[in-house]
Image (cartoon, rainbow, N blue to C red):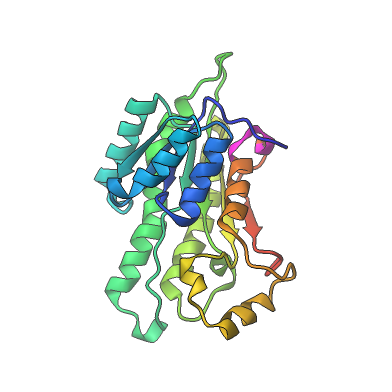
Amino acid sequence: MEQNLKGKVAIVTGAARGIGAAIARQLAKSGADVAVCDVKEEWCAETVSVLSAAGVKAKGYGVDVSSSEQVDSCVKSVIADFGRVDILVNNAGITRDGLLMRMSDEDWDAVINVNLKGTFLFTRAVSRPMMKNKAADGSSAGGSIINIASVVGIMGNAGQANYTASKGGVISLTKTTAKELGSRNVRCNAIAPGFIQSKMTDVLPDDVKQRYMDTIPLRRFGTADDIANAVVWLAGDGAAYVTGQIISVNGGMIG
């Protein structure tokens, strides 16, 4: 089902590059106006340019997702600039990999603060504005919150205690948000990507990539657009009765 998001306003965090930029592009392709958020506003310029060329309204915002003050300020600015917010994609994330017994407090805190706290802060900030959204007939238009989790938040992964804990937390937060906001027509779901091709994975040794490939029934790695397409579906009316779900986009890597 092709989604029509014309008239909708989306916030995408971590949207300057990679999966976040692909999500922003696909939302724009479906007609949504997009607030492009990343750590520094200047990082957003390229994505904003691409979206603007596609004929939608787009603007970049610099925001530290782990700062309550910056997140609240960002959401207020988006509403002032766009008039509303209908879609939130919590995509911003970092890694600081290392074995549990050697992991520093700083590496633990950094990952939890960006990946989990950042998701909480943006979700909290958009909740009331989304609940106030009205459709043309005066009924509640609500909104759609889509969190980018990870397959390792479900299955765990050696050397990523902080990252897996943060993504497992995002999964639980997704389910609770869906229960709390569902009565106001605000849906919340998560996508759990598997092995997605990126600059980070391109540098892995061939034998490591082959070991991952052997666990994937579709026998290919995912792309950023595979994740973006799932986001667009969850954002639109085609998923109007879907909330509190974790959609695994992993080529069959795990069930």
- As rendered, which of 86 and 18 lies closer to the eye? 18
Residue 232 drawn above or below residue 200:
above
Give residue 180's position: percent from left, percent from top: 51, 41
Give residue 16's position: percent from left, percent from top: 39, 50
Residue 164 drawn above or below residue 225:
below
Residue 10 in view (yes/no):
no
Give residue 114's position: percent from left, percent from top: 36, 58
**Which residue is located at x 29 percent, y 45 percent?**
41
Residue 28 drawn above or below residue 225:
above
Residue 116 in view (yes/no):
yes
Magenta stretch: give its range.
Answer: 235-239
Say which quadrant the N terminus sits in. top right
Give residue 14's position: percent from left, percent from top: 40, 52
In which quarter of the view is residue 179 placed?
top right
**Which residue is located at x 31 percent, y 67 percent?**
109
Say which quadrant the C terminus sits in. bottom right
Report the label total. Answer: 0
For this view, does 48 lie left or right of residue 137?
A: left
Q: Is residue 227 magenta?
A: no
For this view, does 85 lie left or right of residue 40?
A: right
Prevailing secondary structure class for the magenta stretch in the rendered image: helix
**Which residue is located at x 42 percent, y 51 percent?**
119
Residue farthest to the top?
A: 137
In which quarter of the view is residue 182 placed?
top right
Residue farthest to the left?
A: 69
In which quarter of the view is residue 5 placed?
top right
